[in-house]
């Protein structure tokens, strides 16, 4: 057996990783979060949040989900300020699927879902081997 089943996941194509003894906390705080922060600084975006892990889907899932999914999980909080400026919290998901991240900026691979010409969602790629190396060197 390689991995146990994650019952709450919406997609069969999105893996769920687990580490024991606090390794997940170190990985999140010292490896993943700083890279996410750097990515959004490069994009000059300060209003962003991670999509809940249960709600993450892959490109392979797009045909299986109704448009309601995108309204509920991706663009459900779009609003308009006075003066007509649209505001929206950018959502993102980390992914281990390199196929979802054809773009690269400053060593960070990513993909995006756009509304018109404006990104509203980012997939940010993390290499599992790099994560394991980080843990081996820091725990």
Image (spheres, rainbow, N blue to C red):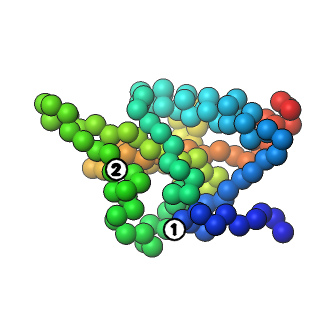
- Quadrant of the frame with the C terminus: top right
Q: Residue at x 61, y 60 (%)?
A: 14
Q: Is residue 61 left or right of residue 78?
A: right
Q: Which residue is mark 1?
A: 60
Q: Tag 1 or tag 2, which sits nearer the N-term?
A: 1
Tell me the quarter of the picture where residue 6 sits.
bottom right
Instruction: Answer few, some or many: residues within 10 Å of disc 2's Cα (few below 14, many 20 plus, some between 14 and 19).
Output: some
Q: Secondary structure at mark 2?
A: loop
Q: Residue 26 in the image: x percent, y percent? A: 75, 33
Between 104 and 59, which is closer to the camera in this rendering? 59
**Which residue is depicted at the point 57% across and 53% down?**
53
What separation in Å lies between label 2 and label 1 (alpha carbons)? 20 Å
Whether residue 83 is situated above or below residue 131 in the rendered picture: above
Q: Residue at x 39, y 62 (%)?
A: 69
Q: Quadrant of the N terminus?
A: bottom right
Estimate the x, y position of residue 36 in percent, counting from the top left.
56, 34
Task: Provide the residue designation for mark 2.
Answer: 75
In this orientation, which residue lies closer to the viewer: 63 or 80? 80
State left or right for residue 78 relative to residue 32: left
Residue 77: image location, x then y, percent? 32, 45
- For residue 90, the mark is none
Residue at the (62%, 29%) spot, across then down = 34
């Amino acid at each position: 057996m390689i991995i146990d089943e994650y019952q709450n996941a919406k997609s069969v194509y999105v893996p769920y990783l687990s580490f024991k003894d606090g390794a997940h906390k170190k990985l999140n705080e010292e490896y993943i979060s700083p890279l996410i922060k750097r990515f959004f600084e490069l994009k000059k975006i300060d209003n962003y949040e991670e999509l809940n892990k249960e709600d993450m889907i892959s490109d392979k899932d797009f045909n299986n989900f109704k448009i309601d999914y995108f309204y509920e999980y991706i663009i459900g909080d779009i609003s308009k300020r006075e003066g007509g400026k649209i505001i929206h919290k950018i959502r993102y998901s980390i992914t281990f699927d390199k196929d979802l991240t054809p773009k690269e900026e400053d060593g960070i691979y990513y993909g995006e879902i756009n509304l018109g010409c404006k990104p509203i969602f980012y997939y940010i790629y993390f290499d599992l081997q790099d994560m394991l190396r980080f843990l081996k060197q820091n725990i």
